[in-house]
Every structure is written in structure tokens, then in C-alpha cells.
Amino acid sequence: MEPNGQQGYEPSSTVVFSQIRQALEIVHSPQSTNDARREAQDFLEKLKGTSRGPLFGHNLGSDRSQPHIVRHYGLSLLEYSIRYQWSEYGEEQKEALLHWVLELSQTIAQDDPSFLRNKTAQLWIEVAKRSWGAEWMDMDTRLVELWNVPDSPAHKEFVLSVLETLSDEVFTGDDPVVSFREGILSKACVEIFTPTSVLVEVFPNRQAGPEVRHGHEGWLTRIAEFLKLCISSGLRDSQTESCAVKCLATMQTQLPWAIPKAIIAADAVEVLCGGLAVQSADVQKGALEALHGMYGRINFNDTEFHDLVLPMYRPWPVQLFKNLFEYSQIDPNDIDDDKYLVLKKLSELLASIGEYLARKFDEVPEGTDVDPFLHLLIQVAQHQSLMVSIPAVVTWGKLLNCKSVSSDRFTNMIGPLLEIATTRLVRYEHLPEDSEEPPLLFLMEDTDTMPERHAFLGNYRRFTCQLVEAIVRLRLADAVTHILSTTDQVLHNLYPPGEGLNKQNYDKHSQPALRVDCQFTVIEAMLKGFKSWKTANSDREAVVSIEANLEAWCNKLIEIQFDDPVIRKRCLQLLVYFSTTALSNKTEFMLKVLEHILMTWPNPEPEYKTFNEAVKDLQGESMVELQRLASEMPDHLIDVYDQISHRVNEMLASGILDEKRTIAYKSFLFIIVTDKINVDAKIPRLREFIDPVKSQWQDTRIQSSLGSYPGFCELLGLDKAQAYLAKHRAHAIQDWGSCPLDSEGLAIQAELEERLKTLPLRATKSFLAFSVERLSRSSPAFQASHALWQDGFTTILADVLRFLSYAHASHNPQNWMGVPPDMRSMVERVLSDRFWQSGISEGSKDDFYARVQDKKGTVEGFASTITGEWARMEEQRIISADGDSALKEEMKSESILRQVTYTATLMVADFLDPSKLNPRTLKPASEGEATVKYPTLRKFCLMNQQIVEPLLVFCAHGIRMKDTRCCSMILRLFVSLVPEFSSDPPGSKKATLPDVDNSPVSPEIASVIREYISTEVLQACITSFHEPYFVDLQKDLASLIASIVVHYGPLTTTPRNVILSLPNVKESDLERLGAYTAKPSSHTRQQRCIVLDMLKDLKGVSVAEMGKMVKSTGFGNSNRGRKPTRTKMAQAFMEAAAPAQGGNPLDSQPRGGTPDPLEGVSGLFDG
């Protein structure tokens, strides 16, 4: 390869250049045939790998007489040689490539198309990632030379693009090449961007390394000065404006990591604020982005706060922000995307600046007027877009909780903030789809899926409730009075004059119901704030006064007669919440609430179907709240247990209660006894509840049905159902929903429902849960429950598992012996999924349940539900869906499957959790008896071959499951498992807990498992790594592949053989991992990068990127053109908050909470 390449125009080269031009014309011509285009593309691709490819690339790219598309292809040839062949070149060849890149960079011109300048900048960056700071030491000098080219905006933009992309790649990118040299590159970036004086001040004892910088000012200062010059010129022409935009884009990548003193030295705050003041939307947006990047940092110390943050509270910046906010207002019916993006970024920026105020309010100098900024922050929180509002709402919650600020500081701002809370806690997800409410219109624009929408709304409600709590803590009496009076106004003006509830056209999510729910949610937040206030204050007189007011208000609420069952249900929830929180010491009030619950049992009105469903919901909620009251208030209830028990037993003896209500009332009494009676007196009383349940399992009919599958069918009446379907030739009926059942069918249907109740599943589940809920294993109460259930528990478990196996056997049509073979095709139809799922099913959930009730008396009502397997789902993907209905059925099946898969994955992860320690044994040790050591649950599973084999097989299959959440969990689990079977498993040289058996896995089992992981698991990783679906998990897959190779490489050749059997994998690449075998758990990121680089030719590409042309928003790395429009903060608001661990199962679903997207499946398997 000749360094200057001038002899490139030989006849042979001329022929090749001609062929290249022809091939490019064919590829880009719309008249070309597919075969011709494919042949031309193959020629162009093959040329990249030839030894003369770089020379051709340089000559074509530098020849300005060539068409632009030919020059671009020439640069692509150079790019390929740098990216994929650099490591194979000698020093002379690398020097030639660098020489060519420098030459191309020097000769760029303003009239060159942007895509040519972009590609040239990319060549520079690719060389820098591989050699800067090592072979190439004068890169900064070369950049400064280009920067100082007189009257050449093109060269300045080129340098800015290089610096922007280099900063982005080194500090936020995931290029394996950068990761290998991360230490060198990051240090070099800090060196050239930072003024020498700042480096000396911040790192006085730093050791001098290789000299990579040119000059003392540093690039951050150079860029800021140039930007200031552009702005002061008034952006006199398009080139000046373009340079300013490029400066801002470069600063955006530097400010999140730059040394704060360097930012101060560059006067960046003033310069960026100047950018907000110019009359250029692009420059304003760029300045906003750069400020957003800087103030997204949370680690400024007090001095840096004074120099960088405090200036933003001055009138000038605040007015600039206000002008930008007002200029960017948009119509929710006609959203301007650019303005809306500015609004969201401005909101996040102001929220970040506001959070600094919350953290460092006491550092604000006396006399500093921050009120204009705070009022602007209120305006942002009031914005009709919840996505614009939420960052400000979060920040206001933190400001009001700031302990260093006087409670009077925000007095004049409390009113508007409370108004925001009381108007924004509406459940927007329940508004009609055609609603013109602006918050809902913006929400539909901001979210892509129903689960995402629900998660965001849940977060918005959570932060708004926290805002209410903070307001109540600051202004208790005023806030309580205002909230209760506002609620009174709502309750007494639910309907327009002369109107009321219409049962005929009943809507569960009517405006009155939503308004009541909104106000009650505010009250619940108020009560949490009151609780916090009581903890922090000792003013007993104020507490007594507030409690008296609350009790009086609740008594008035009890007296109000609401016709709407949804509102009655919400009142019930609120009264119980009052009783268990703010009024927990009011026994008489608690008993009044209890009586209200027992008496709140409206009669069904089946003639009004939707209304009747709401009545049923109210009945169900009354039982839940009854148990909640018992769980939270056992101290008060135990004192009146005899009276309560007498009243409940009267209701049970009346014979009017169904099974569900009967168990609910018994559970209510059971919880009281479990919580508050001493152990000796507890067990006899609890046996009164438990023994009847145990005896039901011993019923002769149940025991005899366990002997065979036909016995199971006979017990549940499935044999009669099969015979009925066969007799009426149900397989030949097209529309089961339109075929009514005759008297025989209705009788069998009723019998099926009754026979299902013979299995005491509901009672067993309820009493088991309440026996151990919230109890420590070492507590006397838990030991009493253990003794209570110990006798007979294993028998019950065995029976349940046997019944479960029979239930699974029902999925096989061949087991339906009551149906002739030629009719068994209908079995799948009988067992098809019938449930409502948000975002998939047609109509609302209420519509779905109404249809279910309508068809209960038809053949359709005979059917039940079932789920599928992953293999079946894959087969269904191959077969095209027969219309929307088939597609929806497939989607529903997959959704249930994902839920079941996730549950199974969680269970396996729990079994193999390395952090899970042994609980204390319930068996007391005898005097003088040696303490018995037990392995942890994880080690127990790994030591027993009959247990570990199916677990590992499931986990291996998990790597191939097309479910990102489950696959990610399995990969992390495997990364922790791999070292367990190495020659030096973790913990083998560490001290262990005295009561834990830490014996290693036997060598025989370890060897077998090692080979399984080295083959099946490794192959599964590689296959998933290759598939587009798993693109987001490629880093995790690479980490596991690296872990397997470095841990097992010294013990077996299997991982090596599997890897080397792959195409385009070189032995030299694999050898790089060998350096980590001595300490396999160290430098895991570098190991992962080696695997990513080694398997780059096998790496899958996301479906979204397939067939896309590489895009770029300017110079530099094309990856920057694919950045998501959502910021990290915005994406966090779209993710559901992690559920609290432990706690009462009754509290797992918040009151009135957003429904799970699979709501409707929840009762699918209820007994």
C-alpha cells in the first residue's frame, strides 16, 4: 500500500473505477432489476475486503472530479479497512491510512455535500479510537491546525463534529473498540478539553503522562469563545448559525462529564444563556440541550453551586426561560413536535435547577430573590401536558420537603400547588377514547402502549400525592380544612340540577364517580401527610382538634346515601383507610365503620347489567375491606370479639351467604384470633376454622377421585359435560354464543359450578395466607401456625398437585373419552382463552363482562380457558392469522404465556438466589445436641442432580424465550451460576456462617453441569445473540459467553470448540480471553467487549434497523442519528414503580389503582 497513492491511476485501476461507477449506478437506479442490483452490490461489497481496497478508496474519495456518490463509496472503502482490518495491518500500512485521513480532512470544502464531510469525520474518529494516545500522539495538534484554517467554517464544523462524536463515544457509547482503550481515551479527552490551569488546580499531584494536548486553553474554552463570537455577531448568516448550532451540540456531549472548574473557566453559563436569547429556534434548542446536559448532573459542591447554579435564579435567565416557555405553547389538537420537545426539555431543565435549590437552599445568599423562578416552576407544573408537568411536580415535592426552609417560605404558592393536585388526580385512563380533555390528548401523543400509559399515570399520581403530603405537613390546619370543604362541594354537587343516577345507561367511569375518586385520593394523601406531621410534632392539642374534625366529617360521609355502587365502594375504602390510619385510636368509630361494612350489601339488580356488575364489585370490595380492617385493627376488635363473632355466626347460619362471602367472614374472625390471642389460647380457637377445611380434603369423594383421571372428571362433572357436548354435536355448531342451552344443559352447567365448590381450594388458600402473613418465622405466632398446619399439610399439597396434573391432562383431546374421536377437534375450541385484555380485546372490560353474562346460558358458557406452550406459540407465528380475531386470540394466549413464564422464572430465580440465607429452624435444639448445618436453598438445589438438571434445562430454554424480561433475568442468574462449577468456586476460601453447610458441589455433578453449560447454554446464547429479537440483550449474552469461556476454559475444551466452530471467528480473537482465566471475575466489561468484537459478524440487527439507510444528524457517528427522543428522565416516568416487598396481600393492589393490563385473568384459576 503506497502512502501517497499517486500511482493509483493505472489502466487496471481505471477499469476498476469504471466498474465501481457502473455498479453504483445500477444499485441506485430505479430501473435496475433485482438480480442486476444484487450482482452490483455483491461486487461493491467484495471490493471492500481486497488488499487494494484502501488505495482505491483514497483515490476515489480525494478525486473531486468524481460524482459525489462515487467519492462517498471510496470513503466507505477506507472506513471498512480501518474498522475491520486495522489489527491486521503493519505500522507502515496504519501510517498510510492515517496520512490519507489527514489529507482528506485538510481538503474538505464548504461546497462538499454534508454526507461526504460526515463520512470524512467518521474516518478520523475511527482512527482515533484505535490509535490516539498510543501511535497517534499529535491528534490535538492536527485538530487545532484545522480549527485555525482562516475563513473556513467547514473546517471548524469538521473539528466540532470530531470532538462531539469522540466525547459521546468515549463517555456514553458502547463500542467495544473504545471499551478496550477506555482508560487511555477518557484520560486523553479530559486532557485536551480542560484548560491546563484547571488541571493543575484540581489535580496538583497528577503524574505527567504522554503529551496529547496542544496549547493551554483546552477545547471547552475554545468552543465557548467561538460560540460567544457567533452569538455576538447576531448570527449574521446561515454559516454562522450552523457553526453556533454545532458548538452547542459539541458542548452538549462535554458538559455532563467536564470538570466543573473548566465549565466555570469557559464562562459556559453566560454563553449558553446568550444562546437562549437569540432569534434562532435551532440555536435556542441547542442551548437548551446543552444546559439540560449540564444541570442533569447532581454532584456540584457548594462552590460549584454558587458559580454554576445560582446564576440561573437571576431575573435575566428566568425571563429567558419564561419567554421560551410561552413561545413554545401548543394546541393539543395540533401538536408542533419541535415546540413540544422544547417544552419537555425545558421542564426537565427547570426541574433539575429546582432540585439544586431543594438540596442547597441554605447556600443561597440572603437577599437573593428566587420567587420568579419558583413561580415559573409552578407554571410548568400547571401545564396541561402531564409529561411537561411531572418533572416540576416532582421538584416541588422535594422543595416542600426541604427541612432547611421555613414553612412560611412557600405560603403564597401553596394554593396553586394544591389546585394542581386536586385537578390532576383524575383517572385519565378511564375517560372516553373520544374525550377532548387536553391532558389525555397529550398523553396519547406521549405514550405508545396501554401498559406504558398506565405506568406513567401511576407515577404521576404517586408524585402528585407526595406533593399533597408535603403541603399538609407544611400547612396542616389550612390544608385539611380546604381539602375537606372542597370534597363536600363535590359530594353535594355530583349531578346537574334535576338529574341523578341513570341505571339504564349506567357508566362505571362516569364523571361523578371520577370526581369522587379524585377527591378521595387527595384525602388519602392528606392522611399520609397528617401521619408524618404527627411524627414530627408534639402539639397534642392540634392533633386532637384535627382528629375530631376528621371523625365528624367521616360521620357525615357515612350518613350520605349514594345510589352509585362505584361511589359507595370508594366511600367504603376511604372510611376503612380513615379507621386504620388517622383515626386508629377511635374504637367507637371503627365499630361504626365495621357495622357500615356488614350492612353495605346492596341487592342485585340483574335487569340493569352494567349496574349489576358494579353492585357485585361493591359486594366483593366490602369483603376485602372487612379483612383489611381485621388485619390492621386487631387490638380494638379483640375486645369486642365475642359480639362480632355472635353477629357473624348469625349471618353464617342464615344460609343466605354464598361460599365467597362465607369464607370472607370466617377469615375476618380468623385474622383477629391470629393476631391478638396468646399462643396457648390461640390454637384451640384456630382449629375451629382449620379442622373443617382439613376434613374436607379427607372426604371420600375427593380421595376416590384422586385415583384416576376419570375419577377427577366425575368429581367435577366433566364427564357429563363431555357427554352433553357430544350428544348435541357441538363440533358442528358454528356460533356457540348464539346457541342457547336447553334445560339439561343449564342443569349440567349449574352442577359444574356447584361441584367445583366441593374442592376446598378457596378456603385453604385464604386460611393458609392469613396464618403466616407478616409473621416472622421465629415468632410464637408463626410457630403456632406451623403446629396448626403441620398435621395433614403434606397430604393436602400432594392432593393439590395430583389435581393439577389432572387439570393439565384435560388439555389433551385424547383424554376426552366421553367425546367420539371424530368430534375431539372441538376440544381446543372448548379450552380457548376467554378473558379481557387491555389493548387487545375489543371494547371495554365492562362490555366484555356484559357479553359473558349474555352468553352464559349458551354453549359458549360451557367453555373454560387454557394456556399454551412456547413451542405452540412459535408454530402459530409461522401460520398467518385468519383475520383480526385470530390475531387477537394469539396475542391473548401469548400474554397469559408471558405471565406464566415470568412467574416460573421468578420461582427458579428465587430457588437459586445467591443472597438468600437459611431461615432459622423451627425445631428447637436439644441440650447438648450438636447444631446441624444445612446448605442454603441454592446450594441444596445445585448439589442434587435430580433437582439441578430440570432447573438448568428450564434456564437454558429461558435464553431462547422471546421475552426480554425473563431472558434478562435468566442471563443474570447464569452469570452467578457459572463460577459455582469452576475449579475455584466462589466462597470456597471464605469464612462461612456457622450454621450453613458450605460443602462444594461434588466433582462428578460439577463436571456434568460444566459440559451442559459449555454446550447447550453456550449454543443458546450464540443463537439468541444472532437473532434480531435479542438485540437489547446482546451485552448480557456476551457477558455470559465470556464468563463460560474464562471460567471453564482451563477445565474443558468444549467452550473453545463451540466458539471456533462459528464462521469468521479467529483463534487469535479467542486467545484474548485467555488472559482473564487466572482471575475470571475481574475486568468483566473488557471480557464482554472482546466477545462483542469477536462475534460482530454474527450479531443480530434489530428489525427496526433492517433495511434502513444509516442516518446522521450532522458530522460524526451515525449512531447519534438514532438516539431516542425520550430523555432518561422521561423514560423513567414511563416505567412502573417497583412493588413494595412484603406487606399485606390485601394491599398489593392500591385502592382504585390502575388495572393490570391482564385484568380479567386474575380470577381465571380461582376455586
Image (cartoon, helix red, strand yellow):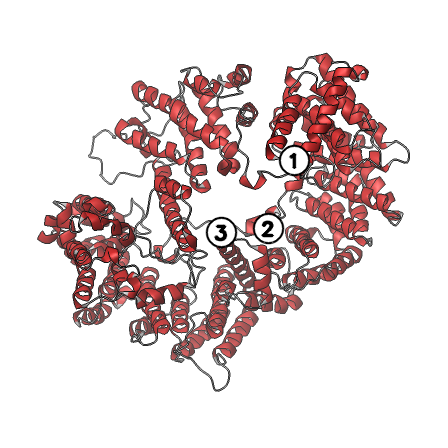
Q: Which of the 4 quarters of the picture holds residue 386? A: bottom right
Instruction: Report the number of numbered marks.
Output: 3
Q: What amino acid type should be assigned to the residue bearing mark 1? A: Ser
x 26%, y 38%: residue:
921
In this rendering, would 860 be left or right of 260? left
Q: Earlier in the sequence, mark 1 or mark 2?
A: 1
Tell me: 811 left or right of 547.
Answer: left
Label 1 and label 3: CA atoms lie apart by 51 Å
Q: Secondary structure at mark 1?
A: loop
Report helix, strand or loop for mark 3: loop
Q: What's the distance in space between the residues labelled 3 and 2, CA to CA?
A: 12 Å
Report x, y in % for residue 106: 83, 27
At 84% from the left and 32% from the top, the residue drawn is 147
Mark 2 lies on a secondary structure that is helix
Which residue lies under the disc numbered 3? 1136
Quadrant holding the N terminus:
top right
How far, Cα to Cα, is label 1 from label 2? 45 Å
Residue 211 visible in the current orientation? no
* Left or right relative to 631: residue 365: right
Quadrant in the picture for residue 854: bottom left
Instruction: Give the vertical position of 39 relative to 794 (above or below).
Output: above
Q: Position of residue 984 (x, y in %)?
A: 41, 19
Which residue is the site of mark 2?
1130
The residue beneath circle 1 is: 32
Given the image, on which type of amino acid does mark 3 rest?
A: Ala
